[in-house]
Amino acid sequence: MRNTLLLLCGALMLAGCCGRPGSDSDLPVYADESQPIEKRVEDALKRMTVEEKVAVLHAQSKFSSAGVPRLGIPEVWCTDGPHGIRPEVKWDEWDQAEWTNDSCTAFPALTCLAATWNTEMSALYGRSIGEEARYREKDVLLGPGVNIYRSPLNGRNFEYMGEDPFLASEMVVPYVREVQKNGVAACVKHYALNNQETNRLRVNVVVDDRALHEIYLPAFKAAVDGGAWAIMGSYNKYRNQHCCHNRYLLNDILKRDWGFDGVVISDWGGTHDTRQAVEYGLDMEYGSWTDGLRSGTSNAYDNYYLAHPYLELLRNGEASMEVLDDKVRRVLRLIFRTAMNTRKPFGSLNSPEHLAAARRIAGEGMVLLKNDDAVLPVDLAKTEKIAVIGENAIKMMTVGGGSSSLKALHECTPLEGIVAAVGDRAEVVYERGYVGDVTGAYNGVTTGRDLSESRTEERLIADAAAAAADADVVIFVGGLNKSEGQDCEGADRRAYGLPYAQDRVVEALAAANPRLVVVLVSGNAVAMPWIERVPAVLEAWFCGSEAGNALADVIFGDVNPSGKLPFTFPVRLEDNSATALGEFPGGKDVVYNEGIFVGYRWHEQQQIEPLFAFGHGLSYTTFAYDNVRANRGSMSDGGSVRVSVDVTNTGDRAGQEVVQLYIGDDASSLPRPVKELKGFEKISLNPGESRTVTFTVTEDMLRYYDDSKGRWVAEKGFFTAYAGAASDDIRGTVRFEYR
Ligand code: BGC
C-alpha cells in the first residue's frame, strides 16, 4: 500500500530537493537512514511549518494520523492489539471496512501469556504478532496491556498480565522488544491506574504514592526501560486530571523521571482539554470524536484538541513553540523508527509458524488447578466415550470483548480440538448444558455459527447429566465469555460467580459422573462453590486461533501443563482486598484503600486462604525441592546473595516447573507484605533429572517505596528468601542479612 521510499523520493523531486532519486547521498538528512536519528529529527523539524507540526499530533482517521506529505514523511497507522491485528475499520467510523485480506492469527489473551511465566513465550508472542502487524503495514501496535489485576470484576483483566508487578514487568519487556524488531512500535497501555471499566472516562483514582510506585507503575517502567516507543494514556483520572494529559504521570514521572523519549498516545476519546493536552504530556490525540467527519463543520479532525484549537493558542502566543517542538520530535522519532524505516523486515501473516506459536503459548499457559485421582490426562487407551458439555466448547472467543476483538482466519474451538485429537479412538458426544450468549457477532465480524437453542434450562441440565452418566469421562467447558458484563471492555463483570446457571450444570455433572474435568475459559477468577465435588479443574483462558488444539494437547497429555496463576482466585469476592475495603468500583472517586495489599499480598497479610493462590499450577509429574541455601549469610551495599535450590522431577513424565523466589522483610519501619515475588525461572526436567536453580538477590529487590521520602529504600536488617512452586507452596527458606 505505502511504499515509503517511492513516496519520499516522489515528494522530494517535486520539492526540488532530491537530485538523483534512490541515492543515499542525495537524500536530505532527515531521510538518510545512515544518519543518527536525533540529527534526522532536528533536520525534519526545522523544515516543518507550524501547521505541519500540529498536523502530526492528531488523528486524520480512526486509526491513522498524518505525516508531512510535502516532505514525504509518511502517515502513522495504529492497530489494536494486544492479541492479534484488528480488522480494518472504515476511515471514519468503527464499522468494518469489509476488507477480505485482513484476517489474522489470534494469539492467546495476555493473562494466558503471563501464566506461562516464561519470558521466551513472551518473546515468541511479540515476534509473531509484530510480524503480523508489520505485514499489515501497521506502525503502532496498541498493546500490550499491563494494568494490575486489582479486582476479579474488572472486565478487561484478560488483556493484562496479572496482579504482580514483578511478573508483569518481566513478561512485558520481551513482548515489546520483539514487536519493535519489526519496525512496529509497541504502545503499552493503559497508563495508568485503569483497573476497572465502570465509569472509566470519569472515575478519579485515589491511591497512595507507595502503592502507585510499588504496584501500579513498575510494569510500565519496565516497558519504558525496555525501550517501548509508545505508551497510551488511560481513560480514568488520577489527581483529578485525566491520565491522557496528566502532569504528574506524564510530565513528571514518565518523561522526567524515567526519561521516556517516545510518544504518549491518547486512548481513543481520552483527550478532554487543549491546554491540558498541550501542557501535560500528550503527544498524539486519537478517537476524540467517534464519527469524525459527521460531527464537525468541515473536517472534525481539524477540531481535535491538538488541532486548530492548539494552533490558535500558538498563534496567540498562549502556547510555547518549545513544548510543540518536543511533541513533534517525539512523533518524528516514532515515524523514523517505524513508518519511515526502510530497513525493517517485511513481516508475515497467518503463517504456520504463527499458528504454532499461538498453540505453544496456549499450551504453556493453561493452568492445572486441581487434579485428584489423576483424572487428567485422559488416557484414550482406556476411554470409550467422552462427554463434552458446555457452551464454551463450541463458542468462538476471538470475536467480542471490545477493542481486542479479532477477525481470525481460523479458530479451533475446544470441541473441534478434542474431536480432532480423539479421531476414531473413542466416541465423543456433545451436550450444551447451558445457554449463554448466542449472538455470534461483534462489530461487524460474525462467527457464522448458529448457537440458537430452544431447550429450557431444566432440559439442558437433564440432557447434559444424562450424557455425562453414560460416558467414561466428562469434560465441561464453561467459564466466562466476551459478552458485556463478563470479560469485556466497557463494563465490569456483574458477579464473581459463573453466569448462566453453570454452577447448577457442574453440580449435576458431578452427581452424574465422578470423572469430571471442569475447563474454565476466562480471563478472570471465578467462584467455584462445587470445588469439593469436582476432581479436576483446568484454567484454559481465551486462547485464540488454536484454543481447541492447545486444550486437547493438555487434556490428552501431549503437553504436560506448566502454567501458573498470574493472579489469586479468592474463594469469595469479599476476600479480594478492593471489595473487602469497599472501593470497587467506587463512585466519582475510587479510593484504593488496600494500598499495596493487592492479590496475594492481601491474602497473606490477612491470612485469608485463597481458592487457588498466585503462582499455583500443577503438572502431570511432580517436583521435589531440596536444599534451599544461600552462598553467604549477608550482603552489603552493592553486593548480592545467591539463593539456590535443587529441583528434581520425581514423577514419570518430562515436565516444566516454574521455580519461584519470594522475599520477605523480617522487620521494617513501614508495613510490608509477608513476601513478594522477586524471581522465577521455568525449567524443563526429564523424569529423575535434577537441576540447581540460582537467583541473585540484589539490594533493589529488598526495597520499598517510602512515600514520606519520595524514594525507594532498602532498610538494613534480616530478610527471608522463600523458594517454592507457588506463593502458598514454599518448599524452603533461607535468611540473610542486609548490612
Ligand atoms: C481502548 C484501547 C484501544 C482503543 C482503540 C479504546 O476504547 O481502551 O485499548 O486501543 O480503544 O481501539
Image (spheres, rainbow, N blue to C red):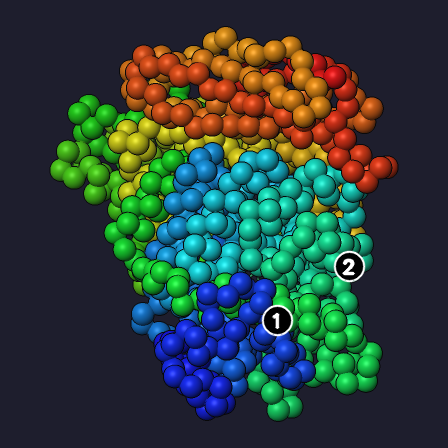
Q: Marks 1 and 2, Cα distance to the nearest angstrom?
A: 26 Å
Relative to residue 471, is residue 577 drawn left or right?
A: right
Q: Label 1 amino acid?
A: Glu
Question: Residue reaching furthest front?
Answer: 25
Q: Determine whether label 1 and label 2 are within 8 Å by CB.
A: no
Residue at 73%, 43% (x, y): give it: 212
Task: Give residue 544's position: percent from left, percent from top.
Answer: 38, 50
User: Can residue 273 be seen here?
Assistant: no
Relative to residue 153, is residue 357 drawn left or right?
A: left
Q: How many marks?
A: 2
* Up/down of 307 relative to 730, above or below: below
The residue that label 1 is drawn on is 42
From the viewer's perspective, is the residue at label 1 or at label 2 nearer?
1
Residues 291 and 305: in front is: 305
The residue that label 2 is drawn on is 247
Q: Tell me if mark 1 has few (under 14), some (14-19) or many (20+) residues whose alpha carbon lies within 10 angstroms of its own.
A: some
